[in-house]
Image (tube, rainbow, N blue to C red):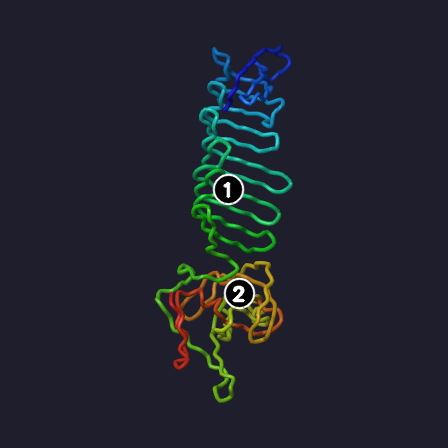
């Protein structure tokens, strides 16, 4: 780690540093002519080099101290480097270079922690990086190069809400693969033996009256309700009265603390997003369903945001049935 031209060593009386039996003051001059004064407390070899257990305190440098096992003036083995700004590197060193271990930084803006492979002060190789601030938490895992995630996954959790986004990182490029505030198809979220089910549609109105519509029966926590099938709308929403009934019956859900606006049968409305633990439709149980809780009216709509939880959907108007594929 240290490249220098001049290396002076001189001893001071032992009573100056009572916790050290062998305190040594040193001046290190680097190749760029920077002089750094340090004090060494530990073992030395016959050449006067730091060798064995010891701690090196920096007097006029951006590093505060280095502590651990040394060999030929370099950390070699288990060691720790603490910088003046509070950065801490600790782990396994090989001749002055950190190769595996932990990094941490904490200040008024937040915190950064990393654990994994290193190339000196760079995150390099397999590792996990967690960055926290007042807005969000970012968790990156995979292969790092020069402090950046090269290949792996990155998850960002918003502090003001429960919204979580997952990215796939390949060659340093991020691609969004999942958000928990929208529904996506996941086969594991569909519980049931059949490869597809046929769900009967409940007719409302008639063609002659010009108000033909179809409802779909769903069950949440033992409570049954009817949702208006609206394939031309995106939202999957629960009306105000129905949701109040579900809450009274102990519905299990996660509030994302996020307000959304949508346009449907009842016009433009606003509501809050939740993740419902389980919804039963026919012989299927669907897990982790994002729903819009309508705060202004009592319409419950089944739009494409529910249907995309399945691999495919067919609507047969003549047979009055909805076919859902696992």
Q: Which residue is mark 2?
A: 291
Q: CA distance from mark 2 to mark 1?
A: 32 Å
Say which element carries label 2.
Answer: strand
Q: Which residue is mark 1?
A: 129
Does 209 sit above or below residue 227? below
Could you tell me which quadrant the C terminus lies in?
bottom left
How far across and down, in percent of the image, does residue 266 sit? 58, 75
Q: For this rendering, which residue is in front, 61 or 33?
A: 33
Sequence order check, earlier mark of 2 and 1? 1
Which is more foreground, mark 2 or mark 1?
A: 1
Say which element carries label 1.
Answer: strand
Q: For this rendering, which residue is in front, 29 or 69?
A: 29
How far across and down, in percent of the image, does residue 178 sit? 47, 56
The reply to whether the C-beta atoms of the residues labelled 2 and 1 are less than 8 Å apart is: no
How far across and down, in percent of the image, does residue 16 sit? 64, 14
How far across and down, in percent of the image, does residue 298 sit? 58, 74
Looking at the image, the residue that sits furthest to the front is 32
Does 3 sit above or below residue 249? above
Does 202 sit above or below residue 172? below
Residue at image position (61%, 11%) is: 12
Residue at image position (61%, 32%) is: 85
Residue at image position (63%, 23%) is: 60
Residue at image position (48%, 48%) is: 154
Does 146 sit above or below residue 228? above
């Amino acid at each position: 780690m240290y490249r220098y031209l001049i290396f002076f060593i001189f001893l001071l009386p032992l009573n100056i540093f009572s916790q050290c039996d062998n305190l040594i003051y040193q001046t290190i001059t680097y190749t760029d002519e920077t002089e750094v004064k340090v004090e060494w407390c530990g073992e030395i070899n016959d050449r006067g080099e730091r060798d064995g257990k010891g701690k090196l305190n920096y007097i006029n440098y951006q590093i505060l101290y280095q502590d651990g096992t040394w060999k030929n003036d370099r950390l070699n083995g288990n060691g720790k480097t603490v910088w003046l700004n509070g950065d801490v590197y600790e782990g396994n060193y090989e001749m002055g270079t950190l190769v595996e271990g932990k990094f941490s930084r904490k200040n008024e803006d937040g915190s950064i922690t990393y654990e994994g492979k290193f190339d000196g002060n760079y995150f390099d190789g397999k590792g996990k990086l967690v960055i926290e601030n007042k807005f969000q938490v970012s968790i990156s895992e995979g292969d790092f190069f020069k402090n950046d995630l090269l290949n792996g996954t990155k998850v960002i959790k918003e502090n003001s809400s429960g919204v979580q986004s997952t990215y796939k990182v390949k060659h340093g490029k991020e691609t969004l693969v999942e958000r928990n505030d929208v529904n996506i198809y996941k086969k594991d979220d569909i519980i049931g033996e059949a490869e597809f089910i046929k769900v009967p549609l409940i007719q409302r109105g008639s063609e002659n009256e010009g108000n033909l519509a179809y409802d779909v029966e769903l069950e949440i926590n033992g409570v049954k309700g009817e949702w208006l099938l609206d394939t031309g709308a995106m939202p999957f929403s629960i009306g105000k009265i129905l949701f109040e009934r579900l809450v009274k019956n102990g519905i299990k859900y996660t509030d994302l603390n996020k307000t959304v606006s949508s346009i449907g049968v009842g016009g433009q409305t606003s509501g809050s997003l939740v993740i419902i633990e389980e919804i039963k439709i026919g012989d299927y149980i669907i897990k982790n369903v994002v729903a819009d809780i309508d705060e202004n009216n009592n319409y419950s709509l089944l739009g494409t945001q529910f249907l995309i939880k399945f691999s495919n959907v067919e609507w047969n108007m003549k047979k009055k049935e909805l076919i859902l594929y696992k």
